[in-house]
Amino acid sequence: MAQLSDDCFAFGGPMMSVDDAVGLIAARVNAIADIETVALVDADGRVLARDIVAPLPLPPFTNSAVDGYAVRNADLPQANAEEFPLDGRIAAGSAADHPIKPGHTARIFTGAPMPQGAETVFMQEDVRIDESGRIVLPPGLKPGANVRPAGEDIPQGHVALRAGQRLRPQHVALAAAFGLTTLDVVRRIRVAVFSTGDELVSPGEVRAPSQLFDSNRFMLMAMLRRLGCEVSDLGILRDAQALLADGLKRVAGQHDLILTTGGVSTGEEDHVKAAVESIGTLVLWRMAIKPGRPVAMGIIGGTPLIGLPGNPVASFVTFVHVVRPTVLALAGGLPEPLLPIPVRAAFTYKKKEGRREYVRVSLRKAEDGALEAIKFPREGAGLLSSLVETDGLVELGEAVTRVEPGQSIGFLSYANMI
Ligand code: AMP
Ligand code: MG
């Protein structure tokens, strides 16, 4: 399990910027060293534990990039088309049994190895076959055209994948191209998830008129699973310090991270703070982020705890900026900074200087083809519909104070966040 020092999340300033939060997490969270071996088909989404050095060049042999006719460079027609007699036929998966004869051409297909001596391939669309069956090749083709040299993609010995890479389908494809059948990955990060609040019941339970169904826990568990975590669903903890403390203490030590939602504000019924302080250490990060509010960071017996706000949108946004980098750091993952893509604002907005804001927007294609961001009409941090009916978040930096229609703004798609 992760073992962190009690003061690892301590922060000096009154307000924590998003960049400070990400930097502090990266600096203070220790990566888990446990490695397991998984079959290639199970590797998607896992974090690679060791560098992969190319055991063979890609492509492994020099081959034709097209269906056509192979010739020696010395025979390439210069000023006029020239006729060539055929010398052999090489399909993908077979190989020529002799070097190409000077002044000849070989029929060759995409992916077939070049016959020895042949260096250039004419696309079949560019040649003509005359009445006597000779191949008429046009002048002017560049030496080496339509050939894929061995190792042009990746030379043998090159570090092709880095330890810490979160594997996506293209990384799995590369491992397969090297002939690997298994990969060493970091074991899944174990996360305990609790909701807190007397007003909450789980879906499937009887809901009293003053209660609502717990939605955050299901959102957070889904986000964690997308990050490759093994999630323990620990249900809902009541708004009582002793019960909260018991619940948290029970799971510390068996998990790499404890995640809670709700109860971290400074109201009389917000007990997470006191509960953590009674059994571990706690710091409250007042993050300069909207939607957000405070995020609790703590350590219980060496296990880190993150307490997210209860409002669903605040919970979502702080997950992306605090939990996501923590999970990546625990897994020893390479940083995956979220890079906003420029789009055109189709709204007016005023904001306070000094904090970062995330505005929920939908994208549409304008008449001139540019992508425009349309702001969700309402702003409440409790509106789940605002996350469902939009495509992502526009990031407005600390220095921004207003947005005018037509202005270029940075867009982050929900699809890229997790
Ligand atoms: P809190 O941070 O506990 O003060 O909660 C802030 C708001 O978020 C309140 O309206 C809560 O009812 C709501 N809330 C807290 N936890 C959840 C949850 N797990 N699912 C849905 N709403 C929640
Ligand atoms: Mg609450």
Image: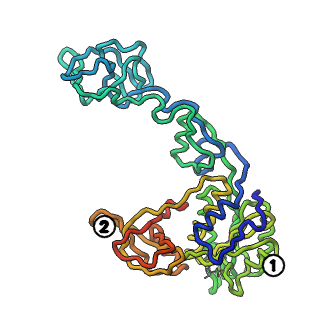
Instruction: Indicate whether 41 appears above or below 314.
Output: above
Q: Residue at x 68, y 42 (%)?
A: 37
Q: Is residue 281 left or right of residue 141?
A: right
Secondary structure, mark 1, is helix
What is the number of the mark on residue 132?
none
Between the residue at mark 1 and the residue at mark 2, the CA separation in whole angstroms equals 56 Å
User: Hey, which quadrant is residue 182 in on the image?
Assistant: top right
Q: Is residue 241 left or right of residue 203?
A: right
Q: Residue at x 60, y 57 (%)?
A: 227
Name the quadrant of the N terminus: bottom right
Q: Is residue 225 visible in the rendered structure shown here?
A: yes
- Mark 1–mark 2 contact, CB under 8 Å? no
User: Hey, which quadrant is residue 369 in on the image?
Assistant: bottom left
* Type of amino acid under label 2: Ala
Q: Residue at x 47, y 26 (%)?
A: 61
Secondary structure, mark 2, is loop
Point out residue 333 in the picture as x, y percentages from the top left corner. Answer: 62, 53
Point out residue 27 in the picture as x, y percentages from the top left corner. Answer: 67, 60
What is the number of the mark on residue 366?
2
In what quadrant does ligand 2 lie?
Answer: bottom right
Name the quadrant of the C terminus: bottom right
Display coloring: rainbow
Point out residue 236 in the picture as x, y percentages from the top left corner. Answer: 70, 74
Point out residue 380 in the picture as x, y percentages from the top left corner. Answer: 52, 81
* Type of amino acid under label 1: Ala
Q: Is residue 205 left or right of residue 337?
A: right
The residue at label 2 has a CB less than 8 Å from ligand 1: no
N-terminal label among 1 and 2 = 1
**Nearest the eye: 58 or 242:** 58
Q: How many marks?
A: 2
What is the number of the mark on residue 242?
1
